[in-house]
Image (cartoon, rainbow, N blue to C red):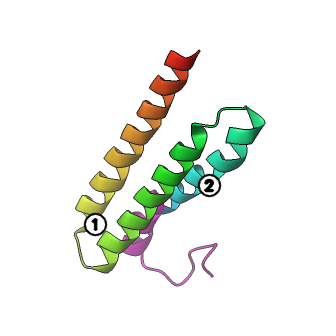
Amino acid sequence: MAVTGEGRSGADRAVHGPAGVALVVGLHFFPLARLYDQWQYRWTAVLLTVVAVVGLVLHAVGRSDESVRVVVGLASAAVLWGSAYHVALRG
């Protein structure tokens, strides 16, 4: 049920969606760090995972759906842009 989202309302999926995407993307960076020999990707993985957890906690404490999506979206964008900038500088 958790994988398919069955049994959850559309509003829950809308909030869990961005946090879930941030979590999956973050977890994918752990093996990518080793595969591409880009060890700074570990920080990208950790930070995106933290962003996902913060989004889920904000939802659990009753923050509005819009605020959760904004926090997760902007924080994820900042982490990914920062990671890309660092890789670009490193060469």
Q: CA distance from mark 2 to mark 1?
A: 24 Å
Q: Residue at x 28, y 52 (%)?
A: 70
Pair 2/1: label in front: 2
Q: Residue at x 40, y 74 (%)?
A: 12
- Indicate left or right for 37 with 49 as reference: right
Q: Position of residue 88 (x, y in %)?
A: 52, 18
Task: Judge whether 1 appears above or below 14 on screen.
Answer: below
Q: Residue at x 53, y 59 (%)?
A: 23
Element carrying mark 1 = helix
- Quarter holding the N terminus is bottom right
Q: Earlier in the sequence, mark 2 or mark 1?
A: 2
Q: Residue at x 25, y 60 (%)?
A: 66
Q: Identify residue for label 2.
A: 27
**Amino acid beneath label 1:** Asp
Based on the displayed image, in which of its 4 quarters is residue 67 positioned? bottom left
Bounds of the magenta segment: 1-19
Query: Which residue is at the far right?
Result: 35
Q: Identify residue for label 1.
A: 65
